[in-house]
Every structure is written in C-alpha cells, then in structure tokens.
Amino acid sequence: MNVYTPPGYSTDTRYPVLYLLHGIGGDETEWQRFADPANLLDNLIADGKAAPMILVMPNGRAQKNDRAEGDVFAAAPAFATFEKDLLNDVIPAIETRYSVKADRDSRAIAGLSMGGGQALNFGFANPAVFGWIGGFSAAPNTRPPEQLISDPTTARTQYHLIWLSCGSKDQLLGISQKTQRFLQQQQIPHSWNVDGHGHDPTHWKHNLWHFCRQVFQHKAAKD
Ligand code: FER
C-alpha cells in the first residue's frame, strides 16, 4: 500500500483515515498516476477545505500475484476477497503504525470502478467500521441494491456521507443509477454526481476532489 500523511503530521494529533481503492487494471500506485492525491490533499488542507487526514491506497487484488497482468478480469474474485484483508490486516496495520482516530466516524472508504464497487460493498456491509462511503463509476462487482443495503433503516441514519458518481458516457452508468434509485426510494441521504465524462481518470480525479472536500467534515463544505 501507499500511505499519505498530511503536512505537519505529528503523533501529538490523531488523524482520520481515507482508504482509497483502485480499478481492475490498477494497483496501489494507480491513483498517483493520474490524480496526484498528495498534492490534491496538500492544497485542500492548506486552503482549509479538507480535514487533515491520512490517505491509504492499498492493493485491492487479494491474490498471490497482485500485479495487474494478463487478463485483468480473471482477478475479479480477488477484489471481493480483499474485504477480509482490509478489515483484518490493512486497517489494523495502519492503526498500529500511524497516529489515527480508530472509530467509524474517522474511517472512510472510496474507490474507482472495481474499487468503487468494493467501497460500496465493504462500506455498507460494515457500518461499525466505516462512516463515510464514496463510489466513483462503480463496476459490476457492486452488489444488487437489496443485498448491498440489507437494512435501509440503519443506512438512513448511519452514514455521514454517501457519495455516488458516474460519467454520463460511462458504459457502467446503469450500475450507479440502480444503486442511486434504491437510495432515493429508501430515503437514504446521499450525493449523486453525474458529469459528462466516460469511464476515465478525469472523472475519478474530480470526484476524489469533491469527496475530500466533504469527508470528515460533519457539515458539507461550501466555497
Ligand atoms: C466488468 C466491467 C468492468 C467488470 C469489471 C469492470 C468484474 C471494472 C472496470 C474497472 O475497474 O475499471 O464486467 O466485471
């Protein structure tokens, strides 16, 4: 995994943590290749527009060969297996090695495409672990709504932020739409951001920016 710590990181302070997940052809370096999350967060924090936070970008392909090689779709099951690695290994490792706030209000999960599906699946299945969820261009690994959110009553009040986004030219738009429609029907508060992009890095970078502006801020940030 790659870990970002905010400017002035000190063990005198405890920080919230955003777990940020990659797509089917990516790995723990993917976000850095196109979104420069360290600069994005440095700038937002300097402007007082994001909470100082730790950002963790793990490899979400939980199998022996975790490289994005060959037929990357063949590794889809390993993205589901990663739920156990995240809960049992990644989060405890971060909470042992870094000065973090270890509670659901201080843990967020977000991701792009395959990682967006993981963020939704893992975030909704583990309300005691995550208080903030972001799914950008979520892929077909996203559980069907009734399985994804088996207890809508709880979901209605549990999450500080549920951020769903997709480009209008993205072939996978239907997956986010189906999820969003369910959230709306069940009156589960959420943000829904559709732009004119396809399944592309600009969409992911923009939505990471939006998500970082709001995560760990108990009131939505305003310009
Ligand atoms: C699929 C189409 C797209 C799929 C996964 C993806 C597992 C993921 C795309 C990405 O992460 O960019 O049918 O099935």
Image (spheres, rainbow, N blue to C red):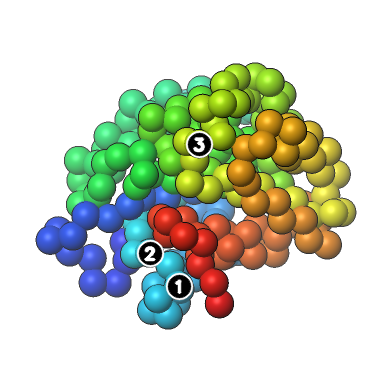
Separation (CA) of disc 2 from disc 3: 22 Å
Q: For mark 3, what is the residue?
A: 157
Sequence-first disc among 1 and 3: 1
Left or right: 18 with respect to 183?
A: left
- 210 and 150: which is toward the camera: 150
Look at label 3 and name its amino acid. Thr
* In this rendering, the label closer to the viewer, 1 or 3: 3
User: Could you say which disc has been placed on residue 19 in the image?
Assistant: none
Tell me the residue at 55%/77% (across/down): 223
Left or right: 217 with respect to 9?
A: right
Tell me the residue at 48%/46% (across/down): 160
* In this rendering, the label closer to the viewer, 2 or 3: 3
Tell me the residue at 70%/60% (across/down): 203
SS under mark 3: helix
- 151 and 15: which is toward the camera: 151
Look at label 1 and name its amino acid. Lys
| Cβ atoms at labels 1 and 2 below 8 Å apart | no
Answer yes or no: is residue 53 visible.
Answer: yes
Look at label 2 and name its amino acid. Ala
Q: Report which quarter residue 188 is drawn in.
A: top right
Q: For mark 2, what is the residue?
A: 51
Separation (CA) of disc 1 from disc 2: 7 Å
Sequence-first disc among 2 and 3: 2
Q: For mark 1, what is the residue?
A: 49
Label 3 Cα crowd, 10 Å radius (few <14 / some 14-19 / many 20+): few
Any atom of ligand 1 within 8 Å of the CB at mark 2? no
Spot occupied by residue 61 in the image (x, y as percentages of width and height):
53, 33
| Cβ atoms at labels 2 and 3 below 8 Å apart | no
Answer yes or no: is residue 27 visible.
Answer: no
